Image (spheres, rainbow, N blue to C red):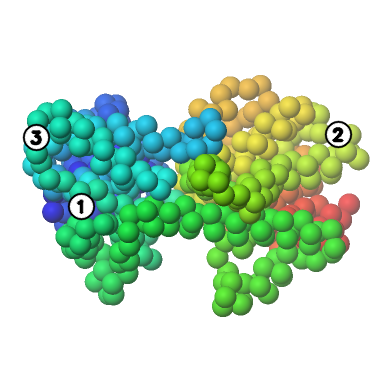
Amino acid sequence: MQLTIIGTGYVGLITGTCFAEMGHSVICLDIDHEKINNLNKGIIPIYEPGLEELIKRNMTGKRLHFTTDYAKAVAFAEVCFIAVPTPSSEDGSCDTTYVFAAARQIGIHMKTNIIIVNKSTVPVGTAEGVRRFVQKELTDRGLNLSFDVASNPEFLKEGAAIQDCLKPDRIIIGANNDKTAQLLRDLYSPFMINYDKIIVMDICSAEMTKYAANAMLATRISFMNEIAEICKRVGANVNEVRKGIGSDSRIGHSFLYPGIGYGGSCFPKDIRALRCKAKKVGCESELLDAVDSVNNRQKKVLGQKIVQYFSTRGGIDGKTIAIWGLSFKPDTDDMREAPSLVLIEDLLNLGAQLKLFDPIAESNARQLLKDHPGLTWCKDELDAAKGADAIALLTEWKQFRLVDFHPIRTYMKGIAFFDGRNQYKPLEMKSKGFDYIAIGVPDQLQETH
């Protein structure tokens, strides 16, 4: 099929590339001329394992193209996906400005019948809004073209998005028209070689499914972070508790890892948007409110542990803290709402000196953190550890899993290690000479000095 993807952000670029990989002809459109020029030169705007190779292969194969020309892109399409940003408004609700702007442009440039598919994460009812905007433009042009609007939410995990797209857990199709549903089934059939994972439902349910999925995952994270705090206070080890409850088939192991809170482009804004939508329709959202509250609190937990540790060692002012990892999760350069930003701001305000290292996200982090006299950018984890009074692990990059801690410990000034992701074994870290402080781990397994 001939497909147009409007928006070359994370979702749009990966979706378009994977459709091309499956043999479809794809045009990816964006109004950002610099981004499109760079993509046409093979310069990729985001980091995602495997993406650059796929883009270049499909560009070479003439299946994947990039443009800023709406007229060209819309005229090309049998199916047009809207994959534009949906940021949070000031009140936390979902801002659909870009979605409806794309709908207008489709209506302005349509010349033949077309299927329009919302790929962006949008509130229930957005598909009908898209329909109205497209129809208004067609009416103003005096045209009587046939089109339909469907919902097809994405479920991509940053760092594993290519695999998620090519071998999805499920494909949700929201369509109120059988013909549209069948066309989208045909579109996704190359992804379903082993067995059919396509779920067709009404549009409103499809729109709601995306928010409900992210809300559930965020809830599991906040739940475990709250359990971790209780474990710490009663002397239980949350790492063991996680294994114990995760072995229950009704619960499972996924998203039961305590840490320093969730971030990224999805969970925070989607929880806020769902809370706002619930409020508008007269529903209380006490659980979602708590999920958000726990997460905001959790982002400050590691900073509080660092301050408490140094309170009996001359205070945090003037201490040097090495920060390992800045992105909100490994295998991405995404810094949106990353917990590291909260910790860095809190420690800088208290007078600490910070040595930062991230293997991928440094460029994006620099743009957000700007120049600050309290920040030093480092070439690797050892460079960051040199002269540090403590290390704080914030992102569980693979290269941090098997670190040689002998030179790390030798070059450090202090001996504190704050593990925000419970990456290491407490007794092993103690044996290496560290005061090891993690999330939800009892005191007797942590600090030794």
* Residue type, numbered disc 2: Gly
Instruction: Look at 26% across and 69% down and name the residue there.
Output: 192
The residue under label 3 is: 143
In the rendered image, the residue lying farthest to the right is 312
First of labels 2, 1 by sequence position: 1
Q: Are marks 2 and 1 in contact (CB under 8 Å)?
A: no
Could you tell me which quadrant the N terminus lies in? bottom left
Marks 2 and 3, Cα distance to the nearest angstrom?
72 Å
Residue 12, placed above or below residue 155: above
Tell me the crowding category of disc 1: few under 14, some 14 to 19, or many 20 or more residues within 10 angstroms, Cα based: many
Q: Are marks 2 and 3 in contact (CB under 8 Å)?
A: no
381 and 370: which is toward the camera = 370
Disc 2 element: loop
164 and 87: which is toward the camera = 87
50 and 428: which is toward the camera = 50
Tell me the crowding category of disc 3: few under 14, some 14 to 19, or many 20 or more residues within 10 angstroms, Cα based: some
Instruction: Look at 20% across and 37% down and name the residue there.
Output: 135
| Nearer the camera: disc 2 or disc 3 | 3
- Does residue 63 appear anywhere in the picture? no
The residue under label 2 is: 315
The residue under label 1 is: 20
Instruction: Look at 58% across and 44% down and name the residue there.
Output: 325
Marks 2 and 1, Cα distance to the nearest angstrom?
56 Å
* Residue type, numbered disc 1: Ala
Image location of residue 117, percent across then percent down: 26, 48
